[in-house]
Image: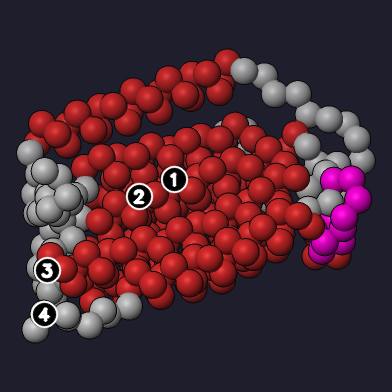
Amino acid sequence: MSTPGLYHILFISTALFFIGVYGFLTRRNLITMLMGIELILNSVNLNFVAFNKYLWPHRLDGLFFTLFIVAIAAAEAAVAIAIIINLYRNHRSIDVEDVQSMKY
Amino acid sequence: MDGSQIIFFMLAALTLVSAVLSVTTRQIFRAAIFLLFSLIGVAGLYFWMQYEFIAAVQIVVYVGGITVLIIFSIFLTQQAGEKLAVYKAGRKLFAALASFCAFAFTMLLVFQHSFIATNKPTVLPTVKNIGTQMLSTDQFGYALPFELVSILLLAAMVGCIIIAIRTKQVNS
């Protein structure tokens, strides 16, 4: 096996991305869908850091993108969980199939 | 195979296996715990790449913040011991097939592409360098996005309070 480098990290991040996509497509519970989104965001962060380390080491741009993505992901998760809790209060369920009051 | 490689493959296996378990397990609390291990694995990969600051941020924000938030919301919205509903096998099969085909296609493109690295001198991602560049206002400084993110966090905080606040029932 060769020394782990950029392609290994890209393999991991791509696999993580599509695991997240699979979770997002198969789950119908809002919290588990949110977990899929977290996996996707993590894979993107891993990509940014790997590109910064292996291809662009004279500047720190990828690192800053990762920092901002982490901050925005935290804000997104907080808002999503507030929405989920509010939904549970109104519908007693957080399954996306059960929430249809705004559909018709 | 030296120690660095062994650590890399262990971290990769930890990340990917716990991510797969997190999206396939039928108990939502276990899904949250497997997500926690997957995020720890990603933080370990950052340590392995010697980006210690990002690894620390990953542990503090994701492992300490978001996972705890998710576990809180599981406790607030889920009955104990209740399993997630099973969905049609066809839908699962289609999702797995679509994900795998997209994964194979992306990996094909990535492995065919040869990336070209710059040969300029390396800037180490030390906390001093990060802080100086993040708060500088001249070229390549990140002061404006930094301020924008702080405003975004404030707006998200206010929005969460507005959304999740318990409104008084008018009719009853």
- Residue of label 4: B171
C-alpha gap between disc 4 and disc 3: 20 Å
In magenta, the rendered stretch is B131-140
Q: Nearer the viewer, residue A98 or B111?
A: A98
- The verdict on a common chain for dots 4 and 2 is no
- Residue of label 1: A40
In this picture, residue B17 sits left or right of residue B7: left
C-alpha gap between disc 1 and disc 3: 28 Å
**Amino acid marked by disc 3:** Arg
At mark 2, the secondary structure is: helix
| Quadrant of the drawing holding the C terminus of chain B | bottom left
Q: Is residue B97 above or below residue A86?
A: above
User: How dense is the environment of label 2, judged by Cα within 10 Å: few (below 14), some, or many (20 and up)?
Assistant: many
- Residue of label 3: A92
User: x%, y% of residue B92?
Assistant: 17, 36
User: x%, y% of residue B31?
Assistant: 28, 60
**Amino acid marked by disc 1:** Ile
Is tag 3's residue or tag 2's residue first in the polypeptide sequence?
2
| Mark seen at residue B96 | none
Disc 1 vs disc 4: which is toward the camera?
4
Q: Label 3 lies in what chain?
A: A
In this picture, residue B73 sits left or right of residue B37: left
**Amino acid marked by disc 2:** Gly
C-alpha gap between disc 1 and disc 4: 43 Å
Question: Magenta stretch: residue B135 in it?
Answer: yes
| Quadrant of the drawing holding the N terminus of chain B | top right
User: x%, y% of residue A75?
Assistant: 49, 62
| Image point (39%, 49%), residue name | A37
